[in-house]
Each structure stands twice: as structure tokens, then as C-alpha cells.
Amino acid sequence: MKVMRSFGNDELAKVYVAETVSGSWVEFVESLQPPLPREEKWVLIVSTMDGCPVRCAFCDAGGSFRRNLSSAEIMEQIDYMVSRRYDSSVKVKKFKIQFARIGEPSLNPSVLDVLELLPGRFDAPGLLPSISSVAPSGCDLFFRRLSEIKEKHYKGRFQLQFSVHSTDEKQRDALIPARKWSLEEIASFGSSFCGPGDRKVTLNFALSTTSKVDDAVISSMFDPQRFLVKITPVNPTYSSSEKNLRSAVDDDGSLCAHQDFVSGLNEKGFDVLISVGEPDENKIGSNCGLYVRKHLSKMAGDSSMYSLVETPEDYTKKDSQSMLKAR
């Protein structure tokens, strides 16, 4: 793997753009959570596909799927970021590896192979793998094997998140235009996945001002002892801008809409986490749904987006053509 460019800084987040030996372009991210130092929490976010077949409404990486990455190609991303800062001993209290940059992880069985390899790859007592999925239909075998791997290697140390975004099935189909599990199916699997001592399964809602969300729907299907709800902003991607999706979550974590949804969940016993990254992460391109390569192909676009990914002075014409060349 050849890393072509990196953007960001070591104090917050860095995005790496690389080309694999097979010629696939990948992006991967390392980030911190200020004011926590790296020794307390360090997050790696890796790609599982070259492109993504799912065209989620908020995400710039969808619609250009070419192939699944191999387990070696996924592991190379992790190895690269680890080797920059540690040897095989990663002394980080919370060392989180998210399979969530580009690609739907449950559509790539190689993700499971990587999960099997990780415990023997690093001396990392704080290792916490995390999979974020839209729960595509037909991936039952993936999730069954994931449950087995969790029980074998990661009991109490695995984070599973399902991207839900709406409790209205028609709107959910518009936001995630792919065949997927119903909310009932997510509830059934998640209840069996979360056993004694496990982390609760996360239901993620990237809330826009027009989201249709009903706490009664959630409480009728999901057990607050096994599920928590995470509220995130709709990040300023090209896709969300084109669809006029305005975030219901402000930069300070306050809600400009759907306060009743959150208060209703709290009253019904659900843990509700409002998760907001640093504003500069949007400018770096490290937040969810952001896709640096798409920005590089839109250099004449909105200058307020990805402003820390502008072409540097030493970015030669030859390099630029290499980064943006058509396949």
C-alpha cells in the first residue's frame, strides 16, 4: 500500500488517502477526542470496500462500488497507523478500531477475518472493535459469525452500531436506499447479540430537521437494557447539501429539533448519547460521511467545506493528475 496524501493534524484527526497493491483507492482515519490524550483514547477508522454500493443520503462515498477489500488490505490500513506511533504494544486505555470509513462492512466477509486476526496482532488490552452497519438484507450469516467472534475474542469489548436514522420506514428507505432489515429484525438480532456483560447495541440517528422519529416506536421494539440511542449531526457533505438536509444537532451538541424524541427516550429508560465531533473534523474530512477524494474532484466547489484539505503549494500538477485520474 502506498499512502499518497494525508490531511489534518496529530492533535485532532488525520485522513490518509492511499492506493493498494491491487490499484484500489482507500481512505482511513486516526482521531483523538480532545481533551483526552492519545494514551486514553485513540480511534482508527478503516475502509472495507473500494467505494460503496449503498447510497445513504448523507454520505459522499456511496454509489461507486468497485470491489471488497481483502483482509490484508484492511489490515494494512491498521498497521500503517499503528506503526507510526507504536510497535506491536499499543498502550492505549481505549483503542477503538471502527470499520466505518468507506463501505458497508457486513457485505465484506474479510472484515470477520480481520476481527479474528486482531487479538494476536497487537498487545492491546484496550482494543475495542466497532462495526457500524445499515443491516443489509441477506447478511444473516455475517452477523451470526460476528456473534461467535465476539463471544470468542471480545466479550464485553465490542461495539455494534446500526444506522437507523428514522423510525418511519418510508423515510428510512429514502435515507438508506438498500434492502435491509426491518426495525423488528434489528431488535431481534441485537437482543440476542447483547449478552451479560456486553456493551449495549447502539441505534444511531443522524438527525436532520425533517427526520421522522418517534420514541414510542423505539420503546415498543427495543429493550433499554440492551440498546442505547446515539444522536449525531448530519455532517456537511456534498450529498447532504445537495439534498438540503439540515442538521438538527448544533456544533455545541444542542438540538434545534426533536427534543421530545430525546426526552421521551430518557423517560422510557434509554441511555441517549448526543455525539458531536470537533468542527475542524469536518474541514479535515475525518467525520462520518465525508469523502476526501470526492472533494478533490470538486476543488471549485464550496470553499467552506473541507477547507483544511485544500491543495498544498507543493501539490504538483503530476500528483494532482495521479490523485484524480479516471479509472
Image: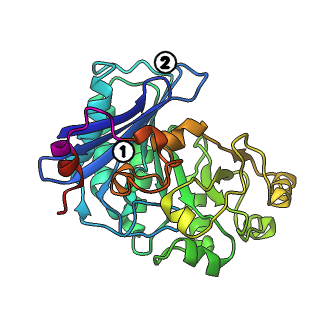
Q: Residue at x 21, y 53 (%)?
A: 70
> Residue 78: where, in percent of width, then height?
31, 36
Residue 120 can be seen, yes or no = no
**Does residue 74 appear anywhere in the picture?**
yes
Q: Is residue 258 left or right of residue 194?
A: right
Dot 2, crowdedness within 10 Å: few (<14), some or many (≥20)?
few
Q: Is residue 326 above or below residue 146?
A: below
Q: Is residue 152 magenta?
A: no
**Which quarter of the rendering shows the N terminus?**
top left
Per the image, label 2 sits on a secondary structure element best described as loop
| Three-letter residue code for mark 2 | Glu
Residue 65 percent coordinates (x, y): 30, 67
Q: Would you place residue 164 above or below residue 114 in this image?
A: below
What is the magenta range? Answer: 311-319
- The residue positioned 64% from the left and 58% from the top of the image is 205
User: Which numbered dot is residue 178?
Assistant: none
Q: Nearest the camera: 37 or 251?
A: 251
Q: Is residue 316 magenta?
A: yes
Q: Which mark is residue 46?
A: 1
* In this rendering, position of residue 325 left or right of residue 192: left
What type of secondary structure mainly makes up the magenta span? loop
Q: Secondary structure at mark 1?
A: loop
Q: Which residue has dot 2 on it?
A: 39
Q: Position of residue 5 (x, y in %)?
A: 28, 38
- The kind of residue tagged 1 is Val
Q: Is residue 7 left or right of residue 264?
A: left
Lower position in the chain sequence, tag 2 or tag 1: 2
Toward which corner of the image does residue 108 lie, by quadrant? bottom left
Q: Residue furthest bottom?
A: 170
